[in-house]
Amino acid sequence: MKELLENFFTSCYDFSESEYELKSKYALVNGMLGITILFVFVLTIFLVFYQKYLFALATSTYLLLQIGAIFFLRKSKTNYRIVIPLIPTISILLILIALNMYPLEHVRLLWFFVAIIASFFLGGRRLGFFVTFLSVFSIVFANYYFNMNFNSYTLVLANVIILLGAAILNLYENREEVSKKRLSDMNISLELRVKDEIKKRILMYEESNNKLKKSALELEKQKNSYRELAFYDTLTGLPNRALFYDRLRHSIHKAKRHHTKVAVLFLDLDNFKEINDSLGHYLGDKVLKAVASRLKNKIRKSDSLARIGGDEFTLLLEDFRDVSVVGDIAKNLIDVILEPIYIDNHQLYVSVSIGIGIYPDDGTDASALLKYADAAMYSAKKEGFGLFHFYKKEMTEKSLERLTLETSIRQGLENNEFVVYYQPVMSSSKNKLIGLEALVRWQHPQRGLLAPVHFMEVAESSALIVQLGEYVLRSAAKQFALWYSQELHPDFLAVNLSVKQLHHHTLMPLLSEILESTSFCTSWLELEITEGYTMQKPKEAIKFLKQIRRLGIRLSIDDFGTGFSSLSYLKKLPVNKLKIDRSFIKDIPRHKGDMALVSAIVSMSKSMHLEVVAEGVETQEQRDFLDSIGCDKIQGYYFSKPISANDIEMKYLKK
Ligand code: C2E
Ligand code: MG
Ligand code: MG
């Protein structure tokens, strides 16, 4: 019912659920306005009827005001705050005045209480008391001036009830306060919950923030590890070539500004390849690590050490007083590396060669300095192990020479400028040719006929020796087969093989192919190998040489005595012949030690059932001595220098 009434009086406004109280007040005001309008209207008619025109004018003005108020209220809800203290107050007063005139006392009282309660409800405590005061005043006023029939008991009762009403209203307001407090409590708990929630969210946020930070850290770590990979050597942890270059460039810039010097040391281990080959990469890596840490411990923190290749290290030195200090440092580094390295029960000896380039004396840019230091290292290595060289201009000139020589060897091979010469191997007792050694010569278009000493080293250090060796083998075999077809050939043809050829995978197929294509008898061919090859990887060498021997090809050890092969090892090698190196022959008969050595080699060969040839025999005395110790096979200028195939034919075969 209440709701229905409320809705009836407030149907033209929208109230949200939380505005329920406002809606009730609104309904009451509207209702009261409606009743007042009706009442004032009746009163106006009544006054006109009794010809009280002045009163009638006042009431009708009031009527208009009330109607205006209704319109004003309907325009907006906010107008309620303006209307509320005015309209109900005036309305209630008017109703009271009118009701005071009403004959039935209890009806008057009822209206009186309703008005008071309504004013408390609508306007709050202050307005309520104000209305109460005015009401009482109006009753008293009406009683005295209009002589109305109010008895004093009624008035006392009215006052008591008013006070009770006020007390009840107070209670109501207290209740309101309680509910307000409850609301504020709720607010607080809500606030707490919100705070809790916020805390939770903050925690969650922090957690995800931490996770984010963690992954950012990991990302940073990854970035660092990529950086490490890009700029550091993974084995030793030292800077790599790229970082070294960068540091070198930086140092050069600094040195330029301060007019100081920078030294680049290029370090290369002398025998690392052998260690790697004989002991394997695992130990090889350990050696590199040990070398790196020794070097690191020997230098200052400000010096920059890097590993730029397999067994190549570089060191950057700044702030040195004079260049001799750099030499001292290089010497110290060589000494520290020379100390034995103990790895997995192995006692290893490593030595290092060092080349030094100085800014600005030798070069002014990073790559040139490094190149010069490299050239100096190369020159140190050539002189022996464990040495250091400062860069000199001639060094690069030499390496340039090497480079041009390499190119012209390549061109020479393309242009068939290489020819094979043959040197006779003679039987001393029979004074007869028994074999030929094929020795390569280069018919250089400008420089004339060149012996191997002018090009062999460069050819051997590059891969060109494989091509050159193949060429010599093919043409010598062809020549020998031709002589054979003319029934001119001697017993054997000796061909030199370089270490690189022996390691090359094409050698075996090449030998088989040559033997087949030239109708060449395998027992005629003798391959000369060096002690160096057999010493590098003895087990594999023996295995490979046995394969060659299985083809029927004979093997000899060239320059015997210059290497370090032991007798027990020699026994295992599948070779047929030893060729005593020229260095042992050339001082015979002056050098008694050599003579003793040569006779020892000859008798040892015999006891091992090996053939023996003496190389470089130049004099009659040498021949006589060799005859006396039973070395019959002789090769040397005494009989003939290496000569062309034609000359061999003329001098030896067609005699
Ligand atoms: P090698 O195999 O020991 O050849 C003997 C060398 O000693 C030849 O030098 C020869 O001319 C020289 N010789 C011989 N008898 C005498 C002598 O009585 N006195 C002097 N002073 N020297 C004598 P060549 O032809 O200059 O060859 C030098 C080296 O070059 C050879 O030494 C060999 O190791 C290498 N070589 C030559 N041709 C070839 C080849 O086709 N392939 C390979 N891999 N190496 C070759
Ligand atoms: Mg030889
Ligand atoms: Mg020789």
Image: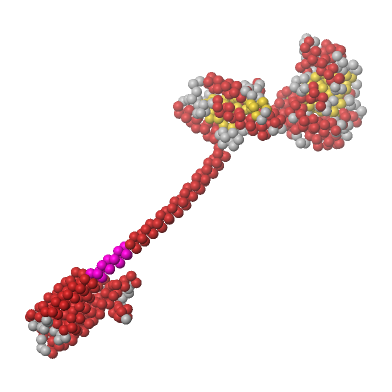
In this rendering, the answer to whether 138 lies above or below 649 is below
* Left or right of residue 432, residue 290 in this image: left
Q: Quadrant of the C terminus?
A: top right
Residue at the far right in the pictured view: 487
Residue placed at 24% from the left, 69% from the top?
Answer: 171
Q: Main secondary structure of the magenta part?
A: helix
Residue 628, given in percent of the width and then of the height, sits at 86, 12
> Relative to the observer, which residue lies in front, 103 or 431?
103
Magenta stretch: includes residue 177: yes
Residue 130, given in percent of the width and then of the height, sits at 16, 72
Determine the image quadrant of residue 460.
Answer: top right
Q: Quadrant of the N terminus?
A: bottom left
Residue placed at 55% from the left, 33% from the top?
Answer: 244
- Range covered by the magenta-colored residues: 170-184
* Left or right of residue 277, residue 24 in this image: left
Residue 547, given in percent of the width and then of the height, sits at 82, 33
Residue placed at 31% from the left, 73% from the top?
Answer: 20
In this rendering, the answer to whether 116 lies above or below 584 is below
Residue 349, given in percent of the width and then of the height, sits at 66, 24
Determine the image quadrant of residue 467.
Answer: top right
Q: Is residue 131 visible?
A: no
Determine the image quadrant of residue 105.
Answer: bottom left
> Relative to the observer, which residue lies in front, 632 or 227?
227
Residue at the far bottom in the pictured view: 49
In this rendering, the answer to whether 187 lies above or below 323 is below
Q: Is residue 200 visible?
A: yes
> Relative to the observer, which residue lies in front, 284 or 399?
284
> Relative to the observer, which residue lies in front, 411 or 5?
5
Residue placed at 22% from the left, 77% from the top?
Answer: 69
In this rendering, the answer to whether 482 lies above or below 194 is above
